[in-house]
Amino acid sequence: MEAPESCPERSITPLLTRPEKVAIVALGHSMNDFTRECMSTFRFNNPYDEVWTLNRGIAAVKRADKIFAMDDLRWLAMRDKAYGAQLQLSTVPIVTSTAYSEFPAAVEYPYAEIKQFIGDDIFNVNTVAYMLAYAMFTQVKEVAIYGADFFYPNGSTAESGGQAVAFLLGLCRFYGIQYKLPQTTTLLYCNKIVQQGNMVQRPPYGYHRKGEAAKLLQQEKEEKARKALVPLYTPPEEGF
């Protein structure tokens, strides 16, 4: 018997949890910050009510409370049988686009409700944005995001979706939702944050030109002074 296309009667219990503090763990380079944090006293104190990961994070994040895999699960299973089998065996809820019967842990993402809540479809461009929009919708109060880097300083790798996540973080600020990002991530240019006197901040663009202009002026003054000390012409001595 062919499985139904989706299982709307499936329990939505996994969607009913309302954690206040959530860690979203994506798979970019700054995920390493989460890995190191897991060995710290901070993590042993269990600071997050839930940890959410995505896609193949099912194999990397040992304590995940939700897995977001927005690609069609049957499509994923056909492309990679081992990965598909892992998803089928998962006991961790898998929030996805369509909950097929052969994936017992699957539960459908409440797309229409979240789109209405956000008032925009900007969140539907990648999985991290889906996760952050879901966090906002379920009234999470604090969210930490690891591994959502999107581009890297050397310019060799770039992924789409960063602008959507940045937009949603702006909405988080509007709604009073606190967010935390590791300093190694390029998301919101956190990797550019430095110590400046008593401040820890991103160097303000444009203001650094003032110092450069002063340096150029000083160089011009020094060059003029040097030229003033050199005679323009020295006549040869007689007899030569």
Image: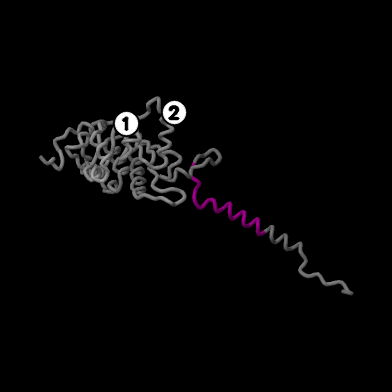
Quickly name the residue at label 2: 40
- Say which amino acid is labelled 2: Ser
Q: From the viewer's perspective, is 94 left or right of 201?
A: left
- The x, y position of residue 190, in whole percent, is 45, 43
Above or below: residue 176 compared with residue 221: above
Q: Would you call the spot at circle 1 few (<14 residues within 10 Å), some (14-19), or many (20 or more)?
A: some
- The x, y position of residue 166, in whole percent, is 36, 46
**Distance between mark 2 and mark 1 Cα atoms:** 17 Å
Q: Would you call the spot at circle 2 few (<14 residues within 10 Å), some (14-19), or many (20 or more)?
A: few
Residue at image coords 49%, 51%: 205
Front in this rendered view, residue 236 or 54: 54
Front in this rendered view, residue 225 or 22: 22
Q: Residue furthest front?
A: 81
Q: Does the magenta stretch include residue 147?
A: no
- N-term mark: 2 or 1: 2
SS category of the residue bearing label 2:
loop
- The x, y position of residue 34, in whole percent, is 40, 35
Q: From the viewer's perspective, is 12 left or right of 187?
A: left
Q: Residue 50: which disc?
A: 1
Q: State which region is magenta.
A: 201-220
Q: From the viewer's perspective, is 200 left or right of 29?
A: right
- The x, y position of residue 214, in whole percent, is 61, 54
Residue at image coords 31%, 32%: 64
Main secondary structure along the magenta-highlighted residues: helix
- Which quadrant, please, contains the C terminus? bottom right
Residue at image coords 15%, 41%: 6
